[in-house]
Image (tube, rainbow, N blue to C red):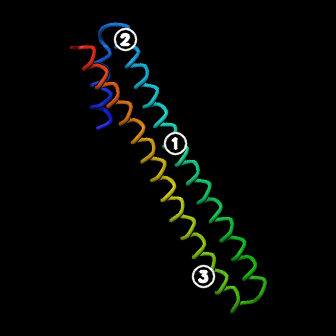
Amino acid sequence: MLALGIAALAVAGCGSDATDSVSSEAQERVEKGAEEAKKGIEEAKEEVEKGFDEAEKAAKEGAEEGAGSAKEGVKEGKSQVQQGIEKAEKEAQQGIEKGREEAERGIEEAEKQAKGYGN
């Protein structure tokens, strides 16, 4: 879908300076959308790493407290990793959605302006 929108922008980009401006603006929005998605993925990655660090810490603490406590620490660590993964997935999805919305707004705006120049 995004590729189709970019192709439409490329076609719309052929013409006057005003159309070129529309294409440039749309391209900037697409790039901004991609940056938002990338940012969401980076934040998700950090959350996953944080979850693993917390899980490792909990497991170490559990091991120090003894065999019975170690099992509890590992269980807690797994829970923290799962929570970190879930939070990371949510943040990544939000970043991707935000990027997609920004790109779609840019494409729609470019199409509207291109139609206006065609009349």
For mark 1, give the secondary structure.
Answer: helix
Identified at 63% across, 75% down, the residue is 77
Question: Is 112 above or below relative to 50?
Answer: above
Residue 75, numbered circle: 3
Q: Which of marks 1 and 3 precedes in the sequence? A: 1
How far apart marks 2 and 3 lie (CA) works out to 61 Å
The answer to whether any part of residue 54 appears in the image is yes
Amino acid marked by disc 2: Ala
Residue at 35% across, 28% down: 109
Look at mark 2 in the image and give the residue it sits on: 18
Foreground mark, 2 or 3?
A: 2
How many C-alpha atoms fall within 10 Å of the one at disc 3: few (<14), some, or many (≥20)?
Answer: some
Mark 2 touches mark 3? (CB < 8 Å) = no
Q: Position of residue 90 (x, y in %)?
A: 48, 59
Q: Nearer the viewer, mark 3 or mark 1?
A: 1
> Does residue 11 appear in the picture of this structure?
no
